């Protein structure tokens, strides 16, 4: 049960991340968006966030035999928000900093 629920939660978080990517594509200039897509840091963060979401989705649904697939996927999506929202809030309340516009920042990824 762990593996199945972990992967369903993981996939739920990844699907939601694809939606966020589409949103990001409309917000950022194309050069910045391309640099994020090719950034190792970005992909490492996404995989770690999805793994944490899969683990949380498993934990939420552990011990229940009649949990639907959809419920576990939705748990993964919700867990993704629990994992990333503190980062987003921290970044949103920071002052704007001047610097190299071509450099990728957490604000680019999480805003």
Image (cartoon, rainbow, N blue to C red):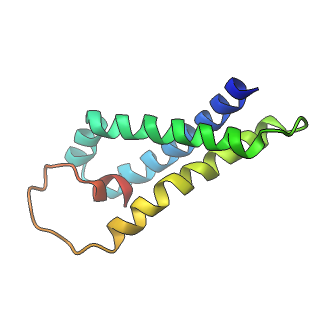
The spot of residue 30 in percent (x, y) is: 25, 46
The C terminus - image quarter: bottom left
Instruction: Please state which of residues 91 and 14 is positioned toward the viewer in this rendering.
Output: 91
**Total tally of numbered discs in the picture:** 0
Where residue 63 sits, quadrant-wise, is top right
Q: Residue furthest right?
A: 66
On the rendered structure, is 108 left or right of 13? left
The spot of residue 35 in percent (x, y) is: 22, 40
On the rendered structure, is 55 left or right of 60? left
Residue 68 vertical placement versus 26 (above, below): above
Where residue 7 sits, quadrant-wise, is top right
Instruction: Please state which of residues 105 and 79 is positioned toward the viewer in this rendering.
Output: 79
Q: Residue at x 60, y 37 (%)?
A: 54
The spot of residue 56 in percent (x, y) is: 63, 44
Q: Residue at x 13, y 49 (%)?
A: 102
Q: Residue at x 43, y 46 (%)?
A: 21
Residue 32 vertical placement versus 87 (above, below): above
On the rendered structure, is 98 left or right of 35? left
The spot of residue 1 in percent (x, y) is: 76, 26
């Amino acid at each position: 049960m762990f593996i199945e629920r972990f992967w369903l939660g993981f996939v739920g978080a990844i699907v939601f991340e694809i939606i966020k990517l589409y949103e990001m594509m409309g917000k950022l200039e194309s050069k910045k968006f391309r640099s994020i897509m090719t950034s190792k840091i970005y992909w490492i963060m996404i995989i770690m966030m999805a793994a944490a979401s899969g683990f949380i989705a498993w934990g939420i649904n552990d011990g229940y035999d009649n949990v639907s697939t959809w419920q576990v996927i939705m748990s993964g999506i919700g867990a993704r928000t629990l994992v990333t929202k503190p980062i987003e809030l921290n970044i949103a309340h920071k002052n704007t900093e001047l610097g190299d516009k071509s450099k990728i920042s957490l604000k680019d990824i999480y805003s």
